[in-house]
Image (cartoon, helix red, strand yellow):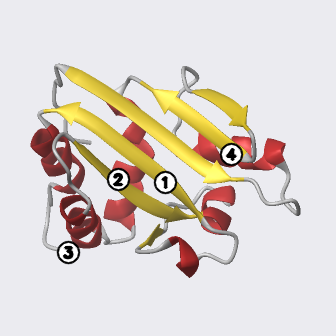
Amino acid sequence: MKIPPQCSFFRLTIQTYIHPTESADKLEAALKGIIRLSTINVERQNNMLVGKSSQIESLSMVYEQTRARRSVSVLRRMLLHNLESNTTFLLLNKQAAAAGVVSLIDRESESPLGGIRIEIQCHPIQQVIDWLTYAMHAD
């Protein structure tokens, strides 16, 4: 893994809606499986699970799996399309995440139970986008 950039400010927020047919505990485990740090705090807010991290390394699973699945270019397009100021986001398939798999989706409607939104705030954000989507070899 390429060394992550140093941001003067970094915040990651991961969130998903809890449907009545879903187990909040299983969803929380899925969030923590995708964002693999013990420092992630997950809170239940109404019908939402919201996790936060201040460590860029929490994106290591996204970094590794987008390379393994050869979807770096899709991730780059998504991050640039969703870019606003020093914030961007990506969406993951919730069912795949429950199985520990990073599967990118363009819209929440692509996942029957909705998606998982990962919002990234960083200054400068372009360094994080470049780090996540740096192609070690052609996709």
Mark 3–mark 1 Cα distance, whole angstroms, equals 24 Å
Q: Earlier in the sequence, mark 1 or mark 4?
A: 4
Q: Are discs 1 and 2 less than 8 Å apart at CB?
A: yes
The numbered dot on residue 48 is 4
Q: Earlier in the sequence, mark 1 or mark 2?
A: 2
Q: Amino acid at mark 1?
A: Arg
Residue at x 21%, y 54% (from the top left corner): 83
- Where residue 8 sits, quadrant-wise, is top left
Q: Earlier in the sequence, mark 3 or mark 1?
A: 1
Whether residue 44 is visible: yes
Q: Amino acid at mark 3?
A: Asp
How would you rate the neighbour count of disc 4 (Cα within 10 Å): few for under 14, some for 14-19, many for 20 or more?
some
Q: Is residue 139 left or right of residue 70?
A: left
> Considering the image in quadrants, where does the C terminus appear?
bottom left
Q: Secondary structure at mark 2?
A: strand
Name the residue carrying label 2: 89
Q: Secondary structure at mark 3?
A: loop
Residue at x 85%, y 51% (from the top left corner): 23
